[in-house]
Image (cartoon, helix red, strand yellow):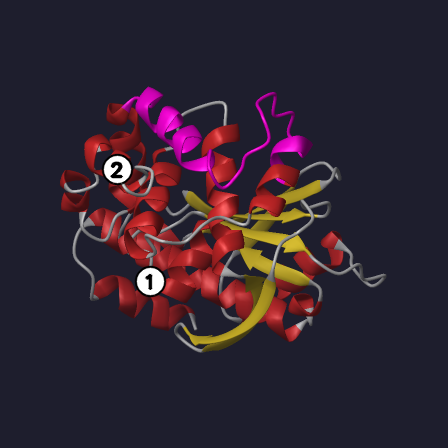
Amino acid sequence: MKDYVLELVKDSSGYNAKLNIMREYVQAYILRILQDKGFFHYAAFVGGTALRFIYGLPRFSEDLDFSMERKDKAYSFGDLLKAVESGLRSAGYSVSIISGSERAVHNAFVKFEGLLFEAGLSPLRSQKFSVKIEMDTHPPKGAEVKTVLINKYFPLSFLTYGNSSLFAGKIHAVLNRKYTKGRDYFDLGWYASRWGDMEPNLIMLNNALKQTGWEGDTVSSSSWRSIVTNTVERADWKKVRQDVESFLENPNDMDIFTKENVLSLFKPKGV
């Protein structure tokens, strides 16, 4: 399996493209390991990487984000990480895993050693690159879930959120994050340009905002567009561009996803 990802890298051009395709393949491989362990009987695949895998979001992602939708007594984050490590080692990868503290959101970094060197992306064999795994064990209530089947390097089937719930999650990230993460804004604009008439799952969005200390009013069907607009207007678009550019399939997309164009997508209907 490692030979295959090295071939994928060889067939790509440019450092960022090679790095992104390598990371995406190992993300898919990790998903397959989790799938084989029955992980998606109780956990949903969410976030930007899910948007890319399911709907073809034209940017790559660093993380694998999950949400526990059904309580399962067999769940052990440590055991899952051991399965991921074992599966990757069996496929020929040299990996180590560093896990974070056991709070409501469990997280870990899967570190790949030697792969950058073998792919010709680093002169140092010891240089590592990481994939972050994050599991929210206390997600906001109200999400709509569904099972999807895709073929991303190999067949994958997993639990995920419905469109309006994924949209709500992205809006929550934009409103709640304490720093400017350009990937959030790109995803937000992409979402609105693809599904212009869609409304976010407001029950889930308000529950998520309440969990993270939102001090504003309850978000409603008549207010969410103006709330998003105010947040986008305050964003430093230079920072947005700097954050997201290296993850784009086509960096020129940022010439289209200007602040003005994104703002136009959230005008109240009839304006």
Residue at horizontal 67 percent and vertical 66 percent from the top: 39
Residue found at the far bottom of this picture: 155
122 in magenta? no
Residue found at the far front of this picture: 270
Residue tagged by mark 1?
A: 56
Of the numbered discs in the image, which one, if any, rests on residue 25? none
The mark nearer the N terminus, 1 or 2, is 1
**19 or 72: nearer the eye?**
72
Of the numbered discs in the image, which one, if any, rests on residue 271? 2
Question: Residue 233: where, in percent of width, then height?
Answer: 31, 24
Seen in the picture, residue 41 relative to 224 is either above or below; the reply is below
State whether residue 123 appears in this view.
no
Q: Residues within 10 Å of mark 1 (few under 14, many from 20)?
A: few
Identity, as a three-letter code, of the amino acid under mark 2: Val
Question: Residue 144: where, in percent of width, then height?
Answer: 60, 60
Seen in the picture, residue 44 relative to 171 is either above or below; the reply is below
Seen in the picture, residue 197 relative to 218 is either above or below; the reply is below
Q: Residues within 10 Å of mark 2 (few under 14, many from 20)?
A: few
Q: CA distance from mark 1 to mark 2?
A: 30 Å
Residue found at the far right of this picture: 73
**205 or 19: nearer the eye?**
205
**57 or 82: nearer the eye?**
57
Position of residue 2 in the picture relative to residue 43 (left or right): left
Among the 4 quarters of the image, the one containing residue 198: bottom left
Among the 4 quarters of the image, the one containing residue 104: top right
The boundaries of the magenta stretch are 208-236
Identity, as a three-letter code, of the amino acid under mark 1: Gly
State whether residue 256 appears in this view.
yes
